[in-house]
Amino acid sequence: MSTRNEAELPFFFGPDQGLFGLFHASAKPARKAVLLCPPLGQDQIRCHRLYRQLAQALAAEGVAVLRFDYYGTGDSAGDSVELDWQRCVADTVVAANELRARAGVDRVLAFGARLGGSVALVAAAQARFAGIVAWDPVLDGRAYVMHLDAMQSALCRDGQRFMVPRDAADAAAQWLGFAISDRFRQQIMALHVERPTVPTLLLDSLSSDAPQPWGSFVADAAAVRCMQPPTPWHDPRRLEVAILSHPLIQAVTQHVQEAA
Amino acid sequence: MQEQAFRFGRARHLVGIAGLPPPVAPEAVGVIVLNAGLVHRIGPFRLHVEMTRRLNACGYPTLRFDLSTIGDSAASGESQTRKQQICADVGDAMKLLGEQAACKRFVLIGLCSGSQCAHMVACSDPSVAGAVFLDGYAYRTLGYHLRYYLPRLLDMKRWLRMLSRRRKAQAGGSEPAFTVAPLPQAVVRADLAGMLDRGLKLCLIYSGGISRYFNHARQFRECFGGIVSRPGVSTRFLKEADHTYILTGDRNRLLDSVERWLFDNFPVTTGGAP
């Protein structure tokens, strides 16, 4: 038990040792590695278990893995309100290089869910990713902001959560439990992810009744894989319920194994 | 102040983050924050990160960590009951923080199931000097029922809303629910009395988010009797807040309460050490 536990090392790294990471050494000498880019906000907490399971599945297949938290998220330094999109991208580059150094390999792929997928796609060139698996990435920041605003507004009137309805002012400058700065809000509003320049697999588990935004994003339809059932990213009743998906873990593990 | 990440425990199966403010004195009280449900050590909406860092700034050494099989911690591989596991895990956490911060006495903080874990350990471990129970054990009382039903009986609009909500709840009622059966009220009352007899300081902070079984500050006394009047006990009902403190203002009010209680009961002495 201890030996297996030792293969998962928690540590701090990066500028001022302010980024938290958890390195999963591979069960056999690694030839490639995968950086798991977390989503942001409540999605990060909801996906924590799944990311751990994915990391362990990849490590068992001989792939070294690094999970990490961006500045202002998780166990990393910084307050939640200090979350900054450019810093997330920069932290991803730092984390990719940290993974290369620890795993002793140069070939690093990236996986990310929701905004984590968006970060991986934006950071692809700087982080020298050999490939990306993006799970329901956010490509249109404006629509995403409107959606979060609507959920935040509805939160105040949630009779299941609060004994008495709350004023809008109590919920201002926050998204689903996390304080946000006006700068970060504007950064997400302006987010527009360009067509990927590295081999990318897009895993689509968004609800089938929602318009899919992938059309102009991926030239090759084979690079999109639909997954069932839909992931309840936007269901307010499940805001604090973990997101788990064994099909997702199988799909990512298989893709990474097959990646040249 | 730099936090440190640790893998620790009798099977090196636990993962935690320690905040170690300088300087530390041998009489320092260490603060250990336990998992809230299945949320990993950062807590709901990062509550535990904000809490430990605030307490570090006040001079308290802290450790937020994942119990066996929760978050990033693995199973210990031992054949133990969940209660034995939790007591052993918290024992490992106290040992680690004791080694890192030279403290011998500890305050446990837990929300929801974390509160139950804190209660379990505080019942028996002599190293525990205090505990903060957030939405801990509570029981529907006569007062609760009167406060709940009387306004509804007299309000037709409430009747209609309640029926509508019940229909919705029934429509979405297929979700599996994983809950821990609460200890009997008499047992909890005796446990709390035992803790106070041993000199522990207790802080009970309950939120409006548990209004299904707790709806007024008076209910502390209705549940636990004269125990809540004893000098070692502090109670607070944050009616406006939800169970996991999703709004930052509510979270800050909670953190203010915890910080003030620690200052009052385990004051920071000269040199920054409590």
Image: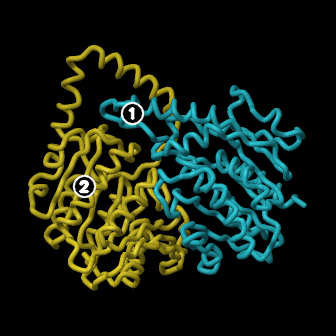
| Residue drawn at (61%, 41%) of the image | A188
Q: Position of residue A42 (x, y in %)?
A: 53, 47
Q: Which residue is mark 2?
A: B257
* Picture layout, residue A89 above or below residue A179: below
Q: Position of residue A30 (x, y in %)?
A: 80, 73
Q: Are marks 2 and 1 on the same chain?
A: no
**Foreground pick, A113 / B65:** A113
> Which dot marks residue B1?
none
Residue at 34%, 30% in the rendered image: A165
Residue A36: which quarter of the image? bottom right
Side (left or right) of A208 relative to A148 = right
Mark 2 crowd level (few <14, some 14–19, many ≥20, 10 Å Cα): some
In the displayed structure image, the side of residue A21 where residue A205 appears, left or right = right
Query: Disc 1 designates what residue?
Result: A160
Q: Amino acid at mark 2?
A: Ser
Amino acid type of the residue tagged 1 in the rendering: Gln
Q: Is the residue B31 above or below the residue A85 in the image?
A: below
Q: Colour of chain B?
A: yellow
Give the position of the C terminus of chain A as an image quadrant. Answer: bottom right
Query: In this image, A12 relative to A165: left or right?
Result: right
* Image coordinates for residue B87, horizontal then vertical, percent: 38, 71
